[in-house]
Image (cartoon, helix red, strand yellow):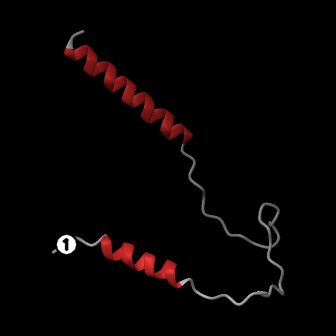
Amino acid sequence: MKLEIARGLFLVGALGVAAVALAAWEQPRTQVLSATHSGEQCPLPRVAKASVAVKPDHDLLLFMFGMSQGMRPQS
């Protein structure tokens, strides 16, 4: 197979994959959520109280801090 034919087939294949990806890509639209159109969402009750006191997970905070420090370039 000639190089030009292989390049042409690759280009056609790449354009086909890009066209399928573009057709399948669905980006959500911006919309205002309101209580009148809450058929799709689960509304929270007005008197929602936490039954358990919420405490931060210090291990998770320490892990996230370590990960953010590890992402810095070494200089």
Residue depicted at x 44% and y 81%: 62
Instruction: Write down the quadrant of residue 18 in the picture.
Output: top left
Which residue is most to the front? Answer: 59
Instruction: Give residue 49's quadrant in the image.
Output: bottom right
Tell me the SS state at disc 1: loop
- Does residue 16 appear left or right of residue 4 in this picture? right
26 lies left or right of 1: right
Residue at horizontal 38 percent and vertical 72 percent from the top? 67
> Badge 1, how many Cα within 10 Å: few under 14, some, many 20+?
few
> In the image, residue 59 lies at what x, y percent?
50, 80
* Image height of 50 relative to 42, above or below: below
Q: Position of residue 19 (x, y in %)?
A: 46, 33
**Above or below, 31 relative to 23:** below
Q: How many marks?
A: 1
Work out whether 40 lies above or below 71. above
- Name above or below for residue 40 compared with residue 1: below
Outermost residue toward the left in this view? 75
Question: Residue 47's x, y, as percent?
Answer: 84, 87
Left or right? Give the position of 25 relative to 32: left
- Amino acid carrying mark 1 in the image: Gln
Q: Toward which corner of the image does residue 48 lie, by quadrant?
A: bottom right
Percent of width and height locating residue 74: 19, 72
Quadrant (top left, top right, bottom left, bottom right) of the C terminus? bottom left
In depth, the one of 69 and 46 nearer the eye is 69
Q: Which residue is mark 1?
A: 74
Lateral position of residue 15 relative to residue 48, left or right: left
**Quadrant holding the N terminus:** top left
